């Protein structure tokens, strides 16, 4: 196989919307305080009866429908998540069971906010090696399950949701639709973003993460483009991990993608961790802001101070 492509995408968010005004009734905060610091206005919150695999399955079903494929067409399911409660069955197996996918390879990948781009690269490698023919790649997180709702520094950031992609091989003669991945981490700074403890709780060292993201990541994002043979100014869209606008906007500006649509879904969805990139990409496609074949930079970063990115063709 010469390469693979994203055939279709889909996304899902719970119905409940939590506004900044709602949060101001719970912790010492305000709409002005939140929007001025992180640019978030609303976020979606899943109910107690909506586990993360259900969010993932909804998004995956939409991606399958958009691709014109059924569960029997999938032989690999990869789910990026860091908020699965149970260790076994894993989330991927539960998603496959919900959808009726017969006998797939099913694996979870936990790279927190960089999870989806790691999962996409893993699936692309499997297809290129001939270990799979068509994959379902999902990023899904229920951050509300691991949030301390009394901590105004973190509770204002998070949201729940899922995004998914159907990934398949390219027809003969077609240019690959998923470029080479560039990935890595700064493990000695892994403590800067944490989901740990009993019960597990999300915490971060905000200033350290901000400085790393805005100073160290722009040249790495440019190298992702170089690996794909794409100049930043030729990008139609930039979909970064939706951490907060104060990270997204300077990172995109330093990248030099002057003609690109910059995804800002964080304003209405909050930080949905591994879901944020496919969720934002799916919305851009759904709204017609990017067109089939457009070059799009996907770049995830966060927990472990991990990062992974690739340039893809819009489905």
Image (cartoon, rainbow, N blue to C red):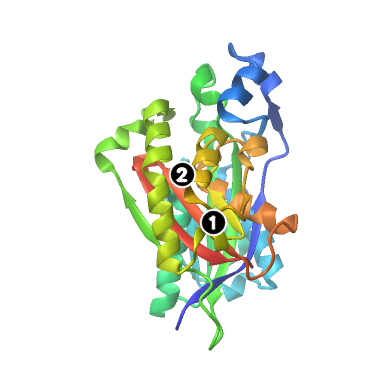
Residue at image coords 54%, 80%: 170
Residue 210 in the image, given as x and y percentages of width and height: 43, 32
Mark 1 residue crowding within 10 angstroms, few (<14) / some (14–19) / many (20+): many
Q: Is residue 131 left or right of residue 285?
A: left
Against 315, residue 49 (above or below) is above
Question: Disc 1 vs disc 2: Cβ atoms closer than 8 Å?
Answer: no
Q: Which residue is mark 1?
A: 138
The residue indicated by pointer 2 is 113
Q: How many marks?
A: 2
The quadrant holding residue 305 is top left
Front residue of 190 and 44: 190
**Label 1 vs 2, first from the N-terminus:** 2
Whole-percent x, y for residue 128 in the image: 42, 77
**In front of the other: label 1 or label 2?**
2
In this rendering, does residue 111 appear at all?
Answer: no
Which corner quadrant of the image does residue 108 belong to? bottom left
Front residue of 260/77: it is 260
In the rendered image, residue 253, in percent from the top left (x then y), is placed at: 53, 45
Residue at 67% across / 23% down in the picture? 20
> Given the current orientation, which residue lies at the most extreme bottom position?
172
- Say which element carries label 1: strand
Residue extending farthest left: 188
Nearer to the camera, 160 or 219 = 219
Image mark for residue 298: none
Residue 242: image location, x then y, percent: 55, 42
Secondary element at tag 2? helix
């Amino acid at each position: 196989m010469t390469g693979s492509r994203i055939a279709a995408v889909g996304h899902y968010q719970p119905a409940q919307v939590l506004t900044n005004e709602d949060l101001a009734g719970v912790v010492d905060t305000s709409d002005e305080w939140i929007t001025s610091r992180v640019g978030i206005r609303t976020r979606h919150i899943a109910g107690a009866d909506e586990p993360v695999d259900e969010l993932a399955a909804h998004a995956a079903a939409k991606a399958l429908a958009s691709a014109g494929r059924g569960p029997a067409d999938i032989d690999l399911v990869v789910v990026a998540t860091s908020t699965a409660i149970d260790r076994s069955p894993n989330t991927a197996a539960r998603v496959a069971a919900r959808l009726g996918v017969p006998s797939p390879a099913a694996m979870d990948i936990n790279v927190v906010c960089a999870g989806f781009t790691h999962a996409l690269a893993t699936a692309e490698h499997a297809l290129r090696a001939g270990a799979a023919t068509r994959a379902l790649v999902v990023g899904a997180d229920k951050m509300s399950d691991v949030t301390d709702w009394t901590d105004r520094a973190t509770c204002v950031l998070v949201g729940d949701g899922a995004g998914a992609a159907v990934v398949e091989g390219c027809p003969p003669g077609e240019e690959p639709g998923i470029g080479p991945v560039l990935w890595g981490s700064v493990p000695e700074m892994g403590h800067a973003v944490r989901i740990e403890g009993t019960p597990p709780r999300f915490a971060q060292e905000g200033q350290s993460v901000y400085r790393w993201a805005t100073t160290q990541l722009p040249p790495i994002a440019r190298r992702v483009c170089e690996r794909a043979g794409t100049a930043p100014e030729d990008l139609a869209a930039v979909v970064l991990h939706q951490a907060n606008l104060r990270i997204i906007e300077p990172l995109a500006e330093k990248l030099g993608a002057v003609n690109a649509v910059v995804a800002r879904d964080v304003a209405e969805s909050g930080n949905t961790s591994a879901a944020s990139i496919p969720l934002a990409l799916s919305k851009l496609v759904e709204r017609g802001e990017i067109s089939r074949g457009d070059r799009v930079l996907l770049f995830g970063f966060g927990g472990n101070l991990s990062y992974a990115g690739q340039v893809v063709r819009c489905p």
